[in-house]
Amino acid sequence: MRLEGKRALVTGGGRGIGRAIALAFAGEGADVAVAARTDSEIEAVAAEVERLGRKGAALRCDVGAPGEIEKVIKDVESLLGGIDVLVANAGMMEHAPVTEVSDKMWDAAIRVNLSSVFWAVRTAVGPMAVRGWGRIIAISSVSGKLGGANRSAYHAAKHGVIGFVRSVALEVADRGVTVNAICPGFVETQMITDARSEFVRYAGDGRDEDETMEMFRQGIPMKRFLEPEEVAAMSTYLASDDARGVTGQAFNISGGSVQV
């Protein structure tokens, strides 16, 4: 098993991509803590981790609230004895043309999608560097490489994640710590389901929800959305010693729709 004896924290770990990553890590031998806002979801994932024979922990956390993710990291270090792998996955998306983006909307998008990554990495990376081994994986998006109408705050934050990852990777490259980003395209998650009506609203071409989502699928070379487990597979690779020479990168998993 590639992560035998490792200890991981996955933010946004209660469902979707975060849940898939947590279970993939446990399947490879890691103890896993998951953090998110919904107790029932993270407790269910922690129980699944335990059923795989690893230690699981569920910690309630609003990553967009200053101080909460730092406290969670300290708690995980106490519960698991340290953090070897940090996956900053939590995120949110709202739609609005820039003229309708309020300060509150902008602030929330930046805090949840970008500042939370900064707060988590700032807290976790020091002990990793001292131990001489660590893996940091930030879940960005293809939105971190492309523009997108009516989602300016989300795209700005996801671009910021990639720049942040590349910078921190250089700071710790000689201390056994790798820092990478994963940039998924459309993934079959609750976030996409919740955004269906907004996609329709801003497409403005008369299609209903199903027709709009099918239009997006047909725009992907592979003609399908991703499964969360596909992102988890890349995360497992980046968390392992197989990827010990890989840092400062932003990997697309997009069915061929993004090639930059």
Image: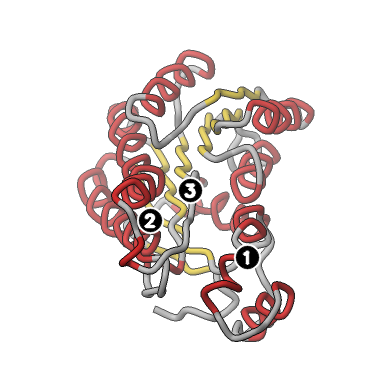
Left or right: where does residue 171 sit relative to residue 5?
Answer: left
Q: CA distance from mark 1 to mark 2?
A: 42 Å
**Which residue position holds label 1?**
197
- Residue pictured at 62% horizontal, 31% vertical: 38
Q: Earlier in the sequence, mark 3 or mark 1?
A: 3
Give the amino acid at mark 2: Gly
Dot 2, crowdedness within 10 Å: few (<14), some or many (≥20)? few
Residue under label 2: 245
**Mark nearer the N terminus (2 vs 3):** 3
Residue drawn at x 57%, y 49% is 236
Picture quadrant where residue 196 is located: bottom right
Residue 82 appears in the picture as rendered: yes
Whether residue 185 is situated above or below residue 212 in the rendered picture? above
Q: Residue furthest right?
A: 51
Dot 1 amino acid type? Ser
Label 3 crowd bin: few (<14), some (14–19), many (20+), radius 10 Å: many
Q: Residue 219: image x %, image y %?
A: 60, 85
Vertical side of 38 occupied by 137: above or below = below
Q: CA distance from mark 2 to mark 3?
A: 28 Å
Residue 238 in picture, x, y percent from top left: 49, 52
Local SS, label 2: loop
SS for callout 1: helix
- The location of residue 237, given as percent across then percent down, is 55, 53
> Mark 3 near mark 1, Cβ–Cβ under 8 Å?
no
- Decide: few, some or many residues near mark 1? Use Cα within 10 Å; few <14, some 14-19, many ≥20: some
**Dot 1 and dot 2 residues touching (CB under 8 Å):** no
In front of the other: 128 or 32: 32
Q: Which residue is mark 3?
A: 91
Residue 128 got which mark? Answer: none
